Image: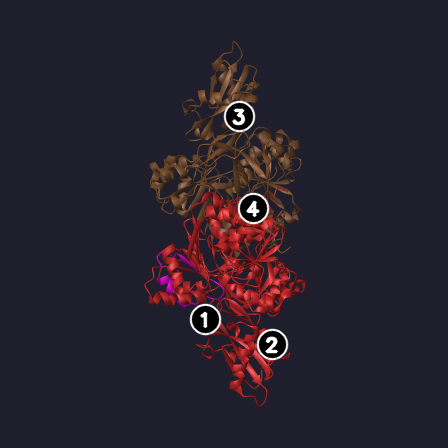
Chain colours: A brown, B red
């Protein structure tokens, strides 16, 4: 077979260290801004690799992270897959029950955890020790280990005395290198594995003109969490491009982001709309210099037109992109086609507000309920099916899910879309009954089950209602048992949900109704509920800022 | 295995046809400029695919092309690999003997041939019919077939009545999709196969910021022949980018190129230095509007500094790239690093004149005679070894060559290079004794054998001598037998070489010497000869313009 050598992450890190030894990696931490360069990064990942090898890893073991965005997390991005192990980025915003399921399912052998997230992980482990049986050690990201019942070591002690060089092995391109769980749909979270080849392909795909190209004079700040599909792959592509990294650390506020943009000269940044709404507010109220910023990538939820306008006014190109855990994640981006360069601004805005053009290297089709492909007329719609080298073809150890989600080599995304004459994809509905709030998924079905488990509830449905800041928030529609005091029930329901779920899962409002409308087959008619109650006034202003994901 | 779907060329053509149906493909032909668009291109490649399927192809058969750069040749680029066959681009400038060997070795079943190149192919076939035994048919690129002894059909008849849609199969990424012979080294030409995956990888690599990125508002004109490693991959990347193609057709002169740049708004073009020297001369003497032209890629031989200056003065960025048949071909490009943006112009020029920075996704090392890696100091040198997903790992059916050319997963390029502190690779010598003239290889060893086969020659050595227009030209150093008339011998040697080789292989000058200096092991000491006779005055002005490759 003449087919070239395997596609792995190694050449990207190797090249950055060799060609750009002095280019910086900057990381906001609890203790201030930390900075070093690719040369030291190379030393540190080698130390990490040596530590992991000494711990007996290097043959496909899964090692978890439970961290915000910072340089140590970035070290695991190349260090863990580089030795032949698998980097499992765990979302610390999930309900404990999900974290427990995920760790048990993945059988993580080590978990790297931030000091500030240790209590959360400790709580989940204490609550269900058997789920954490596979975990041999916790590595706390820092110099020291706080008081904990877990068997923990500080990251700096773990890697500290190791040699700063490492003979990185030739990994097979089919070797799993990453793992991320998607909790969007109902039921248990599903793992998506990324092979070395998928991560290589996705990195190269991002670097195309119609991806999110990063050159060696860029400064890239991923605000999207590193536990969200590898921060959309940006730490890898930034390395491939030889660019400077800026990691905004734990819970960055709009002021922190503005400072980093100004002080580090950030040229490219990426995150969910909620983050940018915060930044917009901050920019309006403060004197912020955005002149270095060239491109701002929005994903996770649709970018409002007003947001595009705002950043256009500040000479920042807002690029709206679409993807999902299963697509590594980038699948489309709303670049303005060359043929639209002379179109009027409103037409351009309309195009740029859509999910965009399929990324070169992928293929898709849009399939209606009869299994027919729909025409590209901007009106007909169907489910988006997508396939390509960085689109998964199966879920981790979930053969029963595969029959539902994959067909004819395509991933069935669950997004209902139209495609216009220019080829721009637009999401018009979601086939699956889930709510996306501030970039994080909330399962309406889980909430309904939880609400209906309350003694005073006869029936309950949960729908997502549009919300300016969080894009969507859950609204509960509850049929109480007869004679129940409604005010007392509302408060009680809140406490009830909080027993099992984080605060940001709690429905913002409870509307009491007489009956949940049903479809012909007896299912909850969510469509009818959304039509009647899907008004933003029902949730607006009801969720405190610090009760939402990432806050 | 979760590894995504296979990497093939299909998504690129599919996407261009779907998203950019009206974007043009322009082709200069004997009969004027022909133009159509991706929509029609999709129809035509489908017709070609149906014709090929009807002919019984689709399972790895090798189909040759013997063509200049035009739209029909481009149709074979996706049509042939798309059905699962292998596109073998044959260099029509080669000596007949090489063409015969190549066709026999590849066992081509069909050859697509330009009308103007038919006599050359016919001659080669008549001279050695057994080498062409595998060829079932010749498809002449055009409406009709000229008088010929070959079993030929016109391309338009071949594809004309076929349906304009085709159900492109799922090809395996390891399936050979391309084949190109390299005749640079001594001995028989060696075939390099490109799998679907290698062509996919190389396309994605070209599209990076540090490759030769093409966006959908670009207009790309590959002047580099399409038989030279797929015109450096540009027809594929131009399709991936959704850009307009311009093909300069048979033997384009500087005036033709200037016209196409002006009239078609070419933004990116690529070719060997000889081509650009011609264009520079033309621009100096004529009123040429280069304002559309953004980037000009130079490869095949080193770009002279004066050429970079010239195009800088005309606001055209000259990008010097390096590659070889074995690397698909792009392996490095002399992009200016971000850190050099403020360096003085002379420093920048020095960097941009080098072969450049390794392309992201590849790895290399530079190994000295003792097998040690040399430091990056711009002075120490060694042989360049390179590896990566688009670098071949073996030659086509030449296991005996593989032991020599590959080591430790790396391709040993034969180029002797230094690497400076910034990581710029510079070719300082060639480990192999070959001459590169106007972008084409000449084997000095073959010429020596041919010269020494002359009755009046005792010994003969051939060296490459620098030449302004052709970069290098062959100089013969001949020891005549005693008593021979030297003037008569020089004329006779010319005729003698012409019996087996094309005019552009004939040494520009013959210098008679008493003895060929030898090394300690008795080999010709080429180094000593180059030192004594490597002066350009010995060949300057001696080769007519129309005697050189491509003319």
Of the image marks 4 and 3, the number of the one nearer the N terminus: 4
Disc 4 with disc 2 on a shared chain? no
CA neighbours of label 3 inside 10 A, class few (<14), some (14 to 19), many (20+): many
Q: Disc 4 marks which residue? A: A199
**Disc 4 versus disc 2: nearer the observer:** 2
Label 3 chain ID? A
Label 2 chain ID? B
Of the image marks 2 and 1, the number of the one nearer the N terminus: 2
Q: Identify which residue, A285 or B379, lies in the foreground.
A: B379
Residue, far bottom? B483
Label 4 chain ID? A
Secondary structure at badge 2 equals helix
Residue A449, percent from left and from top: 57, 22
CA neighbours of label 1 inside 10 A, class few (<14), some (14 to 19), many (20+): few
B524 shown above or below A369: below
Secondary structure at badge 4 equals helix
Secondary structure at badge 3 equals helix
Q: Disc 1 marks which residue? A: B546
Q: From this viewpoint, is residue A463 visible?
A: yes
Question: Which residue range is magenta in the image?
Answer: B290-313
Disc 4 with disc 3 on a shared chain? yes
**Disc 4 versus disc 1: nearer the observer:** 1
Q: Disc 3 marks which residue? A: A444
Image-based side of B384 in relation to A305, left or right: right
Q: How far apart are the two marked residues, 2 and 1, measured between alpha carbons?
A: 25 Å
């Amino acid at each position: 077979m003449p087919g070239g050598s395997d596609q792995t992450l190694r050449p990207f890190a190797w090249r950055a260290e060799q060609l750009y030894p002095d280019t910086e990696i900057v990381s906001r931490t609890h203790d201030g801004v930390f900075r070093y360069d690719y040369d030291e990064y190379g030393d540190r990942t080698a130390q990490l690799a040596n530590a992991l090898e000494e711990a007996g890893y290097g043959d496909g073991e899964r090692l978890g992270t439970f961290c915000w965005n910072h340089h140590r997390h970035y070290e695991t991005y190349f260090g863990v897959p580089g030795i032949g192990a698998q980097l499992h980025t765990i979302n610390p915003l999930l309900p404990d029950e999900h974290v427990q399921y995920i760790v048990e399912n993945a059988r993580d052998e080590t978990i790297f955890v931030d000091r500030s997230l240790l209590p959360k992980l400790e709580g989940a482990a204490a609550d269900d020790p058997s789920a954490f049986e596979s975990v041999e050690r916790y590595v706390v990201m820092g110099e020291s280990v706080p008081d904990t019942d877990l068997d923990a070591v500080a990251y700096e002690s773990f890697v500290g005395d190791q040699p700063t060089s490492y003979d990185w092995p030739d990994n097979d391109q089919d070797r799993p290198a990453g793992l991320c769980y998607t909790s969007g749909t109902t039921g248990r979270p599903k793992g998506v594995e990324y092979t070395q080849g998928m991560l290589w392909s996705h990195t190269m795909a991002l670097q195309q003109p119609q991806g999110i190209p990063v050159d060696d004079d860029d400064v890239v700040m991923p605000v999207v969490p590193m536990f969200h599909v590898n921060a959309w792959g940006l730490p890898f592509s930034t390395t491939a491009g030889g660019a400077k990294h800026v990691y905004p650390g734990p819970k960055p506020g709009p002021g922190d982001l503005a400072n980093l943009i100004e002080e580090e000269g950030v040229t490219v940044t990426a995150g969910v709309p909620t983050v940018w709404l915060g930044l917009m507010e901050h920019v309006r109220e403060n004197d912020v210099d955005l002149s270095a910023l060239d491109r701002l990538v929005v994903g996770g939820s649709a970018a409002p037109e007003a947001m595009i306008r705002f950043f256009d006014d500040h000479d920042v190109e807002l690029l709206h992109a679409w993807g999902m855990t299963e697509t590594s994640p980038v699948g489309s981006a709303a670049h303005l086609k060359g043929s639209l360069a002379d179109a009027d601004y409103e037409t351009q805005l309309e195009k740029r507000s859509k999910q965009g053009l399929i990324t070169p290297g992928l293929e898709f089709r849009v399939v209606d309920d009869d299994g027919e492909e729909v025409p590209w007329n901007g009106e007909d719609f169907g489910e988006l099916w997508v396939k390509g080298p960085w689109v998964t073809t199966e879920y981790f150890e979930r053969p029963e899910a595969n029959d539902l989600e994959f067909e004819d080599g395509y991933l069935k995304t669950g997004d209902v879309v139209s495609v216009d004459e220019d080829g721009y994809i637009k999401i018009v509905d979601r086939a699956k009954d889930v709510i996306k709030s501030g970039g994080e998924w909330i399962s309406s079905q889980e909430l309904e089950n939880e609400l209906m488990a309350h003694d005073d509830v006869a029936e309950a449905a949960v729908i997502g209602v549009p919300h300016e800041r969080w894009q969507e928030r859950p609204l509960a529609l509850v049929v109480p048992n007869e004679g129940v005091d409604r005010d007392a029930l509302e408060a009680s329901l809140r406490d009830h949900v909080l027993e099992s779920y984080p605060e940001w899962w709690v429905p913002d409002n409870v509307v009491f109704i007489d009956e949940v409308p049903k479809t012909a087959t007896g299912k909850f008619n969510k469509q009818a509920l959304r039509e009647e109650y899907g008004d933003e006034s029902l949730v607006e202003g009801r969720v405190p800022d610090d009760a939402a994901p990432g806050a």
